[in-house]
Amino acid sequence: MEEKKEELKQPIPAEETKLEAPKAEAKPEEKAEKKEKAKEKKEDKKEIVLERIYNVPLLKAYKKPETKRGDYAVSLLRQFAARHMKSSEVKIDGKVNEVIKQRGNTHPPKLIKIKATKDKAGVTVVTLAQ
């Protein structure tokens, strides 16, 4: 019994506890090809087709209950961008969202100036106009 207890108390060597996964080595040529393809895809998506600056009225958000005004203002902005840029997919920049929610969800701005850009894939990106 005492021998078994002593065996259990002995620490396990670190070499035995580590499990090593086999490393798959990729060829440098394949890595270069993948990088080139990724760059081409990004360039195709980022190619700007249309860019406009708008003053978006968000006053309709004040017809909603106080707690839902900020969220509704964001959806109004999304609808406005989709309608004027003629695209179904609209992405709103985080800074625009911060400006809308700056005074809290209950008091969004009544007007916001944005820059809407549409890329070749038909995706509209809304950012702050400066």
Image (cartoon, grey):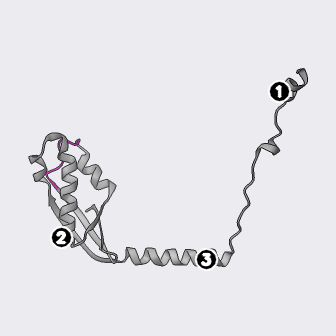
In the displayed structure image, the side of residue 36 where residue 89 appears, left or right: left
Specify the quadrant of the image occupied by residue 27: bottom right
Other-residue count near label 1 (Cα within 10 Å), few / some / many at <14 / 14–19 / ≥20: few
The prevailing secondary structure element of the residues shown in magenta is loop
Measured as percent of width and height from the top left, residue 30 is found at 63, 77
For label 1, the SS is helix
Is 107 a magenta residue? yes
Q: Which quadrant would the N terminus be assigned to in this image?
A: top right
Specify the quadrant of the image occupied by residue 36: bottom right
| Depicted 110 relative to depicted 114: above or below | above
Q: Tell me the residue that label 1 is attached to.
A: 9
Q: Tell me the residue that label 3 is attached to.
A: 32
Q: Tell me the residue that label 2 is attached to.
A: 84
Q: Amino acid at mark 2?
A: His
Q: Residue at x 17, y 49 (%)?
A: 109
Distance in Å between CA atoms under marks 3 and 1:
52 Å
For label 3, the SS is helix
Measured as percent of width and height from the top left, residue 74 is found at 22, 54
In the displayed structure image, the side of residue 28 where residue 11 appears, left or right: right
| Depicted 36 relative to depicted 67: above or below | below
